[in-house]
Image: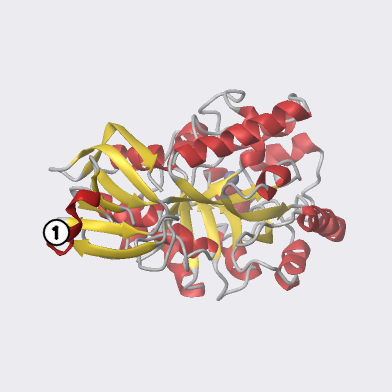
Amino acid sequence: MPLFHASLIYTSEHPDPLEGHVLETDDKGKILNILPLERVEDRKTQIQFIEGILVPGFVNAHCHLELSHMKNMIPTGTGLVEFIKNIVRRRKEVDRQGILEAIAAGEQEMIAGGIVAVGDISNVEDTFYQKSRGLLRYHSFVEAFDLLQDEKAEAEMARAYEVWSKLHCPPGHKKSLVPHAPYSVSSSLFELLRTHPHEGESISIHHQETHAENHFFLEKSGALIDFYQTLGVSLEAFEATRAPSSLQVIQNMSAGRRTLLVHNTISTPRDIRSVEEWNEEVYWVTCPNANLYIENQLPRYLHFIEHGAKMCVGTDSLASNWQLSILEELKTIQHYQSYLTFDRLIRWATLNGALALGFEKDLGSFSPGKTPGVVQIHPFDLSRRQLMPGSRANRLI
Ligand SMILES: [Zn+2]
């Protein structure tokens, strides 16, 4: 049976990393034991001495694999509304073969970078063949949006349901029908989604990614008004709620259900508090590189920590990121908000993501019985316990 030793083993279960320990797995990577080195004296010759550190496989809590063909297509720093306009305009520029090849390459990049599971948004069926191969574990979120047009809610629900039913999940995968964002889903569509019997238990929504989203609800102003105009959709029936967009989540989604709020770039302590009071099962997903790519902005992570928020990490898509790597997301967080310790960040990137997606029984931590993937990070600054710019992830089993 494989025995792995590294200077530090981050289990995502213990508050601190373990020193002087070995990780014992079976040949398929199931965790059998974590033992002090002296307890395996008799099997010393079997120990593989690994440079750097060991961490459980990463969980990418938010991705759009179907946009992989849009790498380097959209300029950075335009703001969300311009970004979405570009996506709508340009996503069909690549032919089907190119789209499928980019999806396979994107998946391969994630596997090579130590990612073992993904919360993946699907608006269309393009990723379904790749997902059916079972190379990487997915919770697929099939997204619905009717651009606040109540009269179109049923037709949109039927369209999304059709996409959802075409996804045949390999064993262990999950799928749900979910709302896109507070500003793009009518209350009728929210209700249809809320009452639909989902196979998967988690649900996801994009949330507070840009100031425009709050301006829209607070005073019916800002770039989203312009966006609706460009699309030729009337906002005559829409009235400002005079509240931040998180109120839409609270009023229209089910408390008690595992809910991934994605981005939260502009969430304030008040927003976080009101959402946490509404639903204890909220997971706050941050995609820092995408936030920098689109808005040149990051969330204030301190606010989330102060409220005990459960944080996860996502890559978003190759349309809004330079790569699909959770390790690179962690480097960015550590670079800009270095008060966050690595043992906290690694829990965000592993166990919390597994919990958010409902995969915690077998993924997310070095806990006997789980098969979470064993990932080496090397080089690693062992004295400061920090990632280095050149740190790389390498899946061992
Ligand atoms: Zn997204």
Judged from the image, the secondary structure of the residue bearing numbered disc 1 is helix
Query: Where's residue 145, x and y in %?
Result: 74, 52
* Residue nearest the viewer, comparing 163 with 147: 163
* Residue 105 visible in the picture: yes
Instruction: Quarter of the image for the N terminus: give it.
Output: bottom left
Q: Residue at x 62, y 38 (%)?
A: 223
**Corner quadrant of residue 15:** bottom left
Residue at 37% in and 39% down: 394
| Numbered disc total | 1
User: Is 293 situated above or below 110?
Assistant: above
Kindly tell me whether mark 1's CB lies below 8 Å from ligand 1: no
Q: Position of residue 58 (x, y in %)?
A: 43, 50
Mark 1, residue position: 41
Which amino acid type is shown beneath numbered disc 1? Glu
> What sort of colour scheme is used for the picture?
secondary structure
**Residue 106 picture location, percent across and down:** 57, 35
Residue farthest to the bottom? 256
Q: Quadrant of ligand 1?
A: top right
Residue drawn at 41 percent across, 51 percent down: 57
Of 31 and 122, which appears nearest the observer?
A: 31
Query: Residue 71: x and y, percent?
Result: 59, 27
Q: Residue at x 69, y 37 (%)?
A: 226
- In the displayed structure, would residue 18 be above or below residue 48? below
Res. 265 visible in picture: no
In this rendering, would 198 be left or right of 219? right
For residue 293, side relative to residue 201 (left or right): left
Q: Residues within 10 Å of mark 1 (few under 14, many from 20)?
A: few
Position of 277 compared to 131: left or right?
Answer: left
